[in-house]
Image (spheres, rainbow, N blue to C red):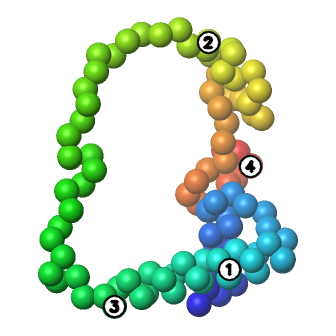
Amino acid sequence: MLDEREMKRLERMAGLRLDQEERETLVADLERMLSYCRILQELDSETVPPMTPVGRAGRALREDDVLPSLSQEQSLAHAPEVRGGYFAVPPVFGEPDDESW
């Protein structure tokens, strides 16, 4: 079962700000998913042959063609925040501090 501390950590890592109703809905959804995973863990898979990972099944190779694309200015035109000519995003790991974010 997800406790309040774990849920707040997940929210922070996902960059979410949920109200209590949204949090309760998400906890219920996550609990259902985790419950399903627990059921799958109990299945005997000893006789099931391993699958070939999709990436190794074969790739359709093609030539790399240079095509027109957006300029840096066009790409950043609607960004919520830009720093030094790049998209500025909050840190994924750790807590943001005033100096880095």
Q: Which mark is residue 42?
A: 3
Q: Quadrant of the C terminus?
A: top right
The residue at the point 44 percent across, 81 percent down is: 37
Residue 95 appears at what percent x and percent y?
Answer: 64, 60
Q: Is residue 98 rendered to the left or right of residue 14?
A: right
Q: Amino acid at mark 3?
A: Glu
Residues at circles 2 and 1 in contact by the CB criterion of under 8 Å: no
**Which residue is disc 4 drawn over?**
98
**In terms of image quadrants, where is residue 18?**
bottom right
Dot 2 corresponds to which residue?
71
Three-letter amino acid code at disc 1? Val
Labels 1 and 3: the sequence-earlier one? 1
Expressed as whole percent of the image width and height from the top left, the position of residue 54 reads: 28, 50
Badge 1 is on which residue? 27
Whole-number angstrom distance, CA of label 3 to CA of label 2: 52 Å
Q: Earlier in the sequence, mark 3 or mark 4?
A: 3
Circle 3 packing at 10 Å, graded few (<14), some (14-19), many (20+), is: few
Residue drawn where x is 69% and y is 29% of the image:
83
In the rendered image, the residue lying farthest to the front is 48
